[in-house]
Amino acid sequence: MGGVMFIFVELMAIHITDDCINCGACEPECPNNAIYEGGVQWRYRDGTGLTGVIPLPNGLVLDADAPHPPISTEYYYIVPSKCTECMGFHEEPQCAAVCPVDCCLPDPDHRETPEQLLAKKAFLHDGAAPPADIQVYLEDLERI
Ligand code: SF4
Ligand code: SF4
């Protein structure tokens, strides 16, 4: 009998490619309200439990009510800081499941472990304290 084998799994946030046809099917499916129409400003508070100014372990603060510039003005886009790959809600990314042109794909620029994704979900929705390594995946803080 072999011993227990641990497998390190790395996941990635999902991003929308320029194959998007702007059908809007993905937006209401996201449990984190991480998907926005092109040209629309995004906020941490949209669809989450976050509100007001939240101090972070790294000395920065997050203003959940502050609007951020759109990541795309042409296509629907996903905010990496709000995407958890649907972990904690669903077994697979819901945006990818409904997209008619398969343009919701893993984003190689935003790699996170399942533990980080679940910690992000707990912070966004469940009142959990921000994790110590939060700056790894909340990268918009400099603009706040
Ligand atoms: S993978 Fe899930 S959490 Fe991430 S953008 Fe798509 S629907 Fe939202
Ligand atoms: S479902 Fe796909 S094609 Fe439609 S808006 Fe979302 S990413 Fe674009």
Image (cartoon, rainbow, N blue to C red):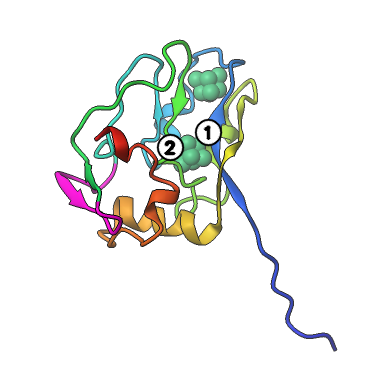
Q: Quadrant of the C terminus?
A: top left
Residue 66 falls in which quadrant of the image? top left
Q: Does 91 appear above or below 44?
A: below
Of label 2 and label 1, which has the lower sequence position?
2
Residue 65 falls in which quadrant of the image? top left
- What numbered label is drawn on residue 24? none
Q: Is mark 1 within 8 Å of ligand 1?
A: yes
Q: Residue furthest left?
A: 52
Taking the spot 32% from the left edge, 50% from the top edge, the residue there is 124
Specify the segment rendered in magenta.
48-59
Q: Is mark 2 within 8 Å of ligand 1?
A: yes
Say which of 48 and 57 sits in front. 57
Structural crowding at the residue carrying mark 2, measured as other residues with C-alpha within 10 Å and reported as few (<14), some (14–19) or many (≥20): many
Q: Is 56 included in the stretch rendered in magenta?
A: yes
Say which of 38 and 81 sits in front. 81
The x and y percentages for residue 6 are 69, 73
Residue 47 falls in which quadrant of the image? top left
Q: Pointer 2 and pointer 1: residues touching (CB < 8 Å)?
A: yes
Q: Secondary structure at mark 2?
A: loop
Structural crowding at the residue carrying mark 1, measured as other residues with C-alpha within 10 Å and reported as few (<14), some (14–19) or many (≥20): many
Query: Which residue has dot 1 on it?
Result: 95
3 left or right of 73? right
144 left or right of 26? left
Taking the spot 29% from the left edge, 27% from the top edge, the residue there is 68
Q: Quadrant of the N terminus?
A: bottom right
The x and y percentages for residue 127 are 25, 59
What kind of residue is marked 1?
Answer: Cys
98 left or right of 74? right
Query: Which residue has dot 2 on it?
Result: 30
The x and y percentages for residue 26 are 48, 28
The x and y percentages for residue 53 are 15, 46
